[in-house]
Image (cartoon, helix red, strand yellow):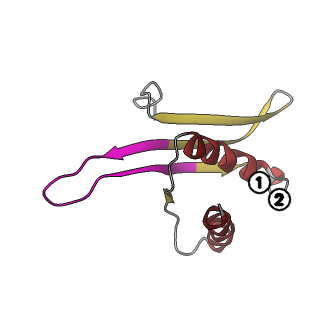
Amino acid sequence: MRNVINIDNHHFVVCKEKDEEIGYIWFEEIIKYDTAFSFSSHYIYIHQISVNENKRGMGVGKSLFNSALDLANSKSIKRIGLDYWVKNSMAKSIYEKWDLRLKEK
């Protein structure tokens, strides 16, 4: 992660409560140009998001996700991508809620 922290299109947001870091998100703005094999695209890709176990369910993840959404909205980006482990049912549930929210905009 150290190698990308100073690259302009990579964004890191840390959520703190008092002096304690309780969560973070790392996302990247990706611009792909037309090639002979693919069309151009412009999207946000969420590499990692994490919230301390004892702070989950308090809106921290939502706040972190909103930081990526705010950047997307400010640049008229219509797509946000991410991956998660198939057995992580909690992540799947959360991301499905976020996906519905994106489709409503």
Query: Is residue 33 inside the magenta stretch?
Result: yes
Which is more foreground, mark 2 or mark 1?
2
Q: Amino acid at mark 1?
A: Glu
Q: Nearer the viewer, residue 79 or 16?
A: 79
Residue at position x 83%, y 59% in the image: 57
Q: Nearer the viewer, residue 74 or 14?
A: 74
2 up-or-down from 26: above or below: above
Q: Nearer the viewer, residue 4 or 2?
A: 4
Mark 2 = which residue?
A: 57
Cα separation between marks 2 and 1: 9 Å
Which SS class for mark 2? loop
Q: Main secondary structure of the magenta part?
A: strand
5 up-or-down from 45: above or below: above
Mark 1 = which residue?
A: 53
Residue at position x 64%, y 35% in the image: 13
Q: Residue furthest top?
A: 6
- On the rendered structure, is 88 left or right of 51? left
- On the rendered structure, is 34 left or right of 1? left
Residue 22 numbered mark, or none = none
Query: Is residue 72 inside the magenta stretch?
Result: no
What residue range appears in magenta? 28-48
51 up-or-down from 94: above or below: above
